[in-house]
Image (cartoon, rainbow, N blue to C red):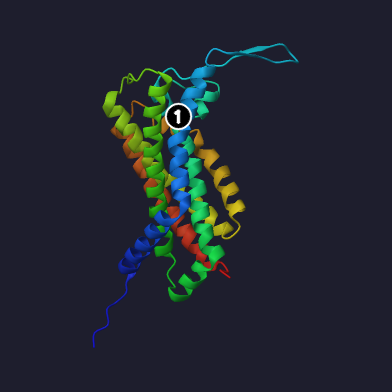
């Protein structure tokens, strides 16, 4: 009689199949995808309607003029160096980079459900290796994040058309826009491992995982526009890919170590 060895690769493939099936049968992913699609439509339409309106501070009497987006692609990113030293305003915050925070919600709720339901405890009782769990959760949530990025992009195109905004591309052209989206998707490999670490720390305390993920994400949030401009080139792609690889490897080890040292009851 021959017994087949159930190695790391086989366990990982099984875990990936299970996690993909679980994610795409949960209402959560479809709620987040719908939100990602609707978000740019609302942002572009509302900011266009408020463009040029004046608000007056009742205490000081100071007037503030609200500025909307100048083009459809401004909700995706800015040209390299264009926002350097600029003050934070509505258009610099309300863009596709908000998807990184939506990814935090996806990761924390997805992993938190494992610990609340007892699935993680049963899984680790049967399998002593935690590494395949961390790798699988990171890969599956990155795919979910990429789908949200694509949904936001589709919503931006639709929202720009509804708002009547120009769709002329920047100096990077179509190639720069494509590489910009590639870079933003690659940066999910930086953010998702951070969220996984926070999730395995908080476990069933999802509120704590989400708060920790949002706080850690905000520390890196200001770097995203610099790494993913609309005129992105291959160097931006390389930097994002290298950063993602280092974060996935380093924080993956941290998450595995936390799971090994934690009481999963």
Q: Where 184 falls versus 248 (above or below)? A: above
Residue drawn at (54%, 65%) of the image: 117
Q: Is 95 rendered above or below residue 67?
A: below
Q: Residue at 49% x, 54% y: name it.
A: 196
**Residue drawn at (54%, 58%), measured in percent from left and top?**
112
From what the image shows, is residue 98 above or below residue 259? above
Relative placement, left or right, of 219 versus 150 is right
Residue in the foreground of this view, choosing between 128 and 166? 166
Question: Quarter holding the C terminus?
Answer: bottom right
Q: Residues within 10 Å of mark 1 (few under 14, many from 20)?
A: many
Q: Quadrant of residue 186?
A: top left
User: Residue at left 38%, top 23%?
Assistant: 161
Q: Answer whether residue 243 is visible to the viewer in this image.
A: no
Lateral position of residue 215 relative to residue 102, left or right: right
Query: x, y percentage for residue 1?
Result: 23, 88
Q: Secondary structure at mark 1?
A: helix
């Amino acid at each position: 009689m021959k017994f087949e060895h159930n190695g790391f690769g086989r366990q990982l493939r099984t875990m990936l199949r299970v996690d993909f099936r679980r994610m795409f049968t949960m209402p959560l992913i479809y709620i987040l995808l719908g939100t990602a699609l609707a978000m740019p439509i609302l942002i572009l339409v509302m900011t266009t309607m408020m463009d040029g309106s004046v608000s007056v501070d009742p205490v000081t009497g100071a007037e503030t003029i609200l500025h909307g987006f100048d083009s459809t692609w401004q909700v995706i990113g800015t040209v390299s160096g264009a926002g350097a030293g600029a003050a934070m305003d509505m258009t610099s915050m309300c863009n596709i980079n908000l998807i990184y925070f939506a990814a935090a919600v996806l990761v924390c709720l997805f992993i938190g459900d494992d610990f609340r339901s007892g699935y993680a405890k049963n899984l680790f009782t049967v399998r002593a290796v935690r590494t395949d769990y961390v790798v699988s959760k990171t890969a599956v949530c990155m795919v979910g994040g990429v789908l949200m990025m694509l949904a936001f992009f589709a919503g931006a195109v639709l929202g720009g058309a509804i708002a009547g905004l120009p769709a002329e591309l920047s100096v990077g052209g179509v190639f720069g826009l494509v590489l910009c989206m590639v870079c933003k998707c690659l940066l999910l490999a930086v953010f998702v491992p951070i969220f996984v670490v926070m999730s395995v720390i908080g476990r069933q305390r999802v509120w704590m995982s989400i708060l920790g993920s949002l706080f850690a994400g905000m520390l890196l949030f200001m770097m995203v526009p610099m790494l993913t401009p609309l005129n992105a080139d291959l160097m931006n792609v390389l930097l994002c890919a290298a950063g993602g690889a280092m974060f996935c490897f380093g924080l993956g080890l941290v998450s595995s170590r936390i799971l090994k040292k934690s009481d999963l009851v």
